[in-house]
């Protein structure tokens, strides 16, 4: 194709994307026939009565209505544009201390990108990852990470996210991608600015606020579709003209313009989920304490089986949510008034007056789900030369920090004491990175101060740890 025609095609695609916003969505078919599913339903009926959704999960009485979903997206879009970006702030007690330019990166990065490309996931060095991606909830979308006011809590600072943010560099924003970029500057897929998951800067971060374990099969399919459809020159496919779509599909099938080389690129996918199941969902479901752990395991297995089948050359970090542990640790100290006001709204199952009497039971169920995640990660069907799952427990015993004088340090928490601050995301990235280099049964299970310990690969232990090479 002549260069001028290709350039014109790209310009048309960008214009179409801007003028006709849209998203790429994929759904899982269900063999069950229930009154209402996530993609169908009557809005008036949903408002006037509680309806049973597929697999008896009721995530909202309104989410089966397409008009309501479109209205919700529109409101968030307007909200985001009115408030403007907050992720670029560089001052505050909840930000990590900047590392001066004269201080070198803690690790020697030379020799940790393999040549030739490894054939086994159990022989990956930090620089061998080409693509990063993430599934999860608002802790992965970095919701409110740089918030200073209540009304900023709905802004997703995705560029700051501990496992998928790539804004700045490790000196200003320690994230897993910013660490990996030191080993492989060509890494891609990370979020690079404030955005919702339908915005281009979110890239391969499809985490969504209020997501629960039951959402993971759907979100996994959306992620795969997004990665397979992602062209080299931006998000052109979303709503381009019909003839342009045909050209793009032909080029993508032949790997001419797709960034992700599906069969050859090594992918690092981080999944952290479960907090909202017990923070804002379990108390609204009928008899949920009797079946929630069983259903969580089912959805987790469904998600991992799907990923194993569809995503070759992938290492999955499976991470337990710190939400409940952090919440209980904050209860031991005098939480600020702002937190006392917001937490009953954002985490009503634990702090709402109607449901909080059962909070210890919910915590027990959450602890049981953490054990389920670890057990599932060891299942033999999730381990091969092209795919593996590793349970990373650095959040398992998470707690707020304490200063030397014994007073609590809440600087890792956002203004609502539910989400993580930018410093909290940096501390989390440090914890995940250490876990990835720690062998099985010797992994850190609690958060530590930033850079208190920062592990590095060595010539004797150059590989990312899996169950097969530990």
Image: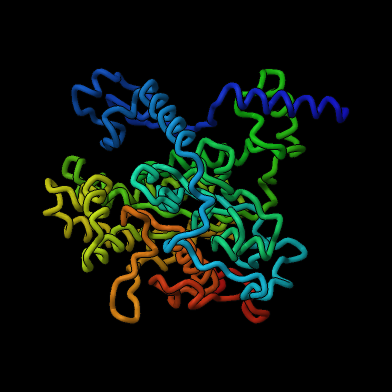
Give the number of marks: 0
Location of residue 232 with respect to 177 vertically, above or below: above
Q: Quadrant of the N terminus?
A: top right
Q: Nearer the viewer, residue 98 or 384?
A: 98
Does residue 320 appear in the picture of this structure?
A: yes
Query: What percent of the width, then of the height, locates residue 220?
Result: 48, 43
Left or right: 76 as drawn, with respect to 127: left
Residue shown at 71% from the left, 66% from the top: 113
Q: Is residue 385 above or below residue 353?
A: below
Question: Which is more toward the observer, 342 or 209?
Answer: 342
Q: From this viewpoint, which residue is outermost toward the right?
A: 2
Res 379 visible:
no
Task: Pinpoint residue 58: horizontal percent, then vertical percent.
Answer: 26, 35
How was the colour assigned to the protein in this rendering? rainbow
- The residue shown at (27%, 58%) is 366
Percent x, y of residue 19:
60, 22
Q: Is residue 396 left or right of residue 174?
A: left
Query: Residue 176 lies in what quarter of the image?
Result: bottom right
The residue under the point 62% across, 27% down is: 17
**Residue 331 position in % (x across, y down):** 22, 64
The residue shown at (51%, 53%) is 89
In this rendering, the answer to whether 329 lies above or below 402 is: above
């Amino acid at each position: 194709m002549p260069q001028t025609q290709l350039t014109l095609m790209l310009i048309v695609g960008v214009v179409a994307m801007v003028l006709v916003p849209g998203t790429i969505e994929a759904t899982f078919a269900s063999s069950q026939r229930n009154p209402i599913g996530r993609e169908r339903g009557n809005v008036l009926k949903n408002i006037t009565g509680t309806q049973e959704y597929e697999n008896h999960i009721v995530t909202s009485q309104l989410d089966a209505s397409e008009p309501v979903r479109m209205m919700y997206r529109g409101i968030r879009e307007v909200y985001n544009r009115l408030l403007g970006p907050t992720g670029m702030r560089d001052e505050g007690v909840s930000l990590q201390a900047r590392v001066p330019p004269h201080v070198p990166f803690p690790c020697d990065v030379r020799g940790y990108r393999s040549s030739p490309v490894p054939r086994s996931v159990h022989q990956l060095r930090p620089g061998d990852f080409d693509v990063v991606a993430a599934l999860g909830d608002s802790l992965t979308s970095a919701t409110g990470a740089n918030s200073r006011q209540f009304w900023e809590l709905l802004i997703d600072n995705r560029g700051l996210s501990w496992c998928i943010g790539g804004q700045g560099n490790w000196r200003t924003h320690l994230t897993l991608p910013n660490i990996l970029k030191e080993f492989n500057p060509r890494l891609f897929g990370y979020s690079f600015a404030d955005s919702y998951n339908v915005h281009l800067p979110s890239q391969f971060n499809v985490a969504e606020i209020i997501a629960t374990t039951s959402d993971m099969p759907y979100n996994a399919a959306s992620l795969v579709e997004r990665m397979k459809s992602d062209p080299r020159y931006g998000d052109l496919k979303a709503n381009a003209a019909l003839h342009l779509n045909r050209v793009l599909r032909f080029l993508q099938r032949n790997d001419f313009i797709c960034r992700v080389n599906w069969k050859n690129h090594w992918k690092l996918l981080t999944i952290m989920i479960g907090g909202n199941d017990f923070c804002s969902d379990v108390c609204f479901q009928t008899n949920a304490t009797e079946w929630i752990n069983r259903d969580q395991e089912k959805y987790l297995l469904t998600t991992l089986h799907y990923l194993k089948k569809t995503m070759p050359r992938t290492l999955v970090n499976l991470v337990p949510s710190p939400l409940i542990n952090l919440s209980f640790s904050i209860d031991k100290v005098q939480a600020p008034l702002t937190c006392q006001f917001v937490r009953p709204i954002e985490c009503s199952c634990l702090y709402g007056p109607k449901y909080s009497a059962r909070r210890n039971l919910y915590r027990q169920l959450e602890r049981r789900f953490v054990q389920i995640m670890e057990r599932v990660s060891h299942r033999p069907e999730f381990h091969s030369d092209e795919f593996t799952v590793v349970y990373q427990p650095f959040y398992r015993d998470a707690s707020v920090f304490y200063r030397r004088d014994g007073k609590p340090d809440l600087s890792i928490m956002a203004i609502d004491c539910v989400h993580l601050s930018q410093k909290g995301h940096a501390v989390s990235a440090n914890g995940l990175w250490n876990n990835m280099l720690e062998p099985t049964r010797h992994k850190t299970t609690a958060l530590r101060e930033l850079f208190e310990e920062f592990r590095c690969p060595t010539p004797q232990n150059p590989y990312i740890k899996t169950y097969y090479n530990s």
